[in-house]
Image (tube, rainbow, N blue to C red):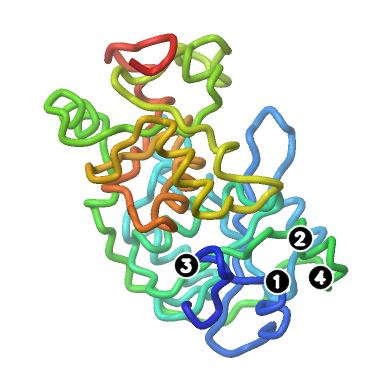
């Protein structure tokens, strides 16, 4: 969507552009709002009360591998295709994703759509907060259905398993970059999910998303470069992004791709899987 991009990133579109294109053919707007369970907020309930006109709701928890004990893992291609077609999202359409916090869960939806083959996906710069602050219109209720076709093919190279991560760290083929807050990474704060040990993957580096997201918007490329460098990441080597459960890892993916350094993969199970496994755990600062 280069012709629609915000100057900060070819993967961002402005509220001005979206407002001017509401109702345009072949455009689908996707509300990808998801909230940490402890907040008590429900993305779908909020969507039904108010959303950008014409938007459909992408439920990160429902459009997932519900057979997995881990939260919101990627679904099968068959399930994803059915879910997208039920929402009227076509693989060849222009897709603009936003969330209720500005820039939190939208990158996970953006990444998921692209991983399954969507060809033209962007994120609304500033998300719903910026849209509302500018006094732009919203509507309530369910979205209307329009038929669409989505031939889903997952690019499995984009997804790292727990064994992939362990192997890459063992032979130092790739770096793991963890998006969690520093206190959680160091093991100084309790994990929000039962049975998950505090700490981090041995050898991982830490880049909290707060370093690359400012007031619900992606930081500028210079700031991202500095944050990545401060985290000890060598951009000439492959990077696997990780977080608590695979959501904010996609923010790091967006940040890295924005500066021309797309990650090698995203660890879908992230710390929820690793911390509950028998894999070794490190605490304290990155080594």
CB within 8 Å, label 2 to label 1: yes
Say which label, 3 or 1, has the lower sequence index.
1
Reading the chain from its start, which is encountered first: label 1 or label 4? 1
In the rendered image, which residue does mark 3 sit on?
Answer: 84
State the CA–CA distance, disc 3 to disc 2. Answer: 26 Å
Image disc number at residue 139: 4
Q: Secondary structure at mark 2?
A: helix
In the structure shown, which secondary structural element does the residue marked by tag 3 occupy?
Answer: helix
Q: Secondary structure at mark 4?
A: loop
**Residue 212 sits above or below residue 102 on the image:** above
State whether residue 124 is above or below residue 273: below
- Marks 3 and 1 sit apart, C-alpha to C-alpha, by 24 Å
- Nearer the camera: disc 4 or disc 2: 2
- Nearer the N terminus, badge 2 or badge 1? 1
User: Is 230 left or right of 22, judged from the image as shown?
Assistant: left
Q: What is the number of the mark on residue 15?
A: 1
Between 221 and 138, which is closer to the camera in this rendering? 221
Of labels 4 and 2, earlier in sequence is 2
Residue drawn at point x = 57 percent, y = 48 percent: 105
């Amino acid at each position: 969507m280069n012709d629609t991009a915000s100057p900060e990133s070819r993967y961002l579109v402005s509220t001005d552009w979206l407002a001017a294109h509401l109702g345009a053919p072949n455009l689908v707007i996707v509300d990808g709002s998801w909230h940490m369970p402890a907040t008590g907020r429900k993305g779908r309930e909020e969507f039904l009360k108010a959303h950008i006109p014409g938007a459909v709701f992408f439920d990160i928890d429902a459009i997932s591998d519900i057979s997995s004990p881990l939260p919101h893992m990627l679904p099968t291609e068959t399930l994803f295709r059915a879910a997208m077609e039920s929402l009227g999202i076509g693989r060849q359409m222009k897709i603009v994703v936003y969330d209720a916090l500005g820039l939190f869960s939208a990158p996970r939806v953006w990444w998921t759509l692209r991983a399954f083959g969507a060809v033209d996906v962007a994120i609304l710069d500033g998300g719903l907060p910026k849209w509302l602050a500018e006094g732009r219109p919203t509507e309530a209720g369910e979205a209307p259905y329009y038929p669409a076709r989505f031939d889903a093919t997952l690019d499995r190279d984009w997804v790292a398993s727990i064994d992939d991560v362990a192997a890459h760290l063992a032979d130092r083929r790739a770096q793991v970059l963890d998006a969690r807050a520093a206190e959680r990474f160091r093991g100084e704060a309790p994990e929000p999910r039962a049975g998950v040990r505090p700490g981090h993957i041995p050898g991982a580096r830490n880049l909290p998303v707060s370093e690359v997201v400012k007031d619900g918007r992606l930081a500028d490329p210079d700031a991202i470069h500095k944050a990545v460098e401060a985290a000890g990441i060598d951009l000439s080597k492959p990077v696997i992004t990780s977080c608590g459960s695979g959501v904010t890892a996609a923010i790091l993916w967006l940040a890295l791709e924005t500066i021309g350094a797309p990650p090698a993969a995203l660890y879908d199970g992230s710390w929820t899987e690793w911390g509950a496994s028998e894999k070794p755990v490190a605490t304290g600062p990155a080594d």
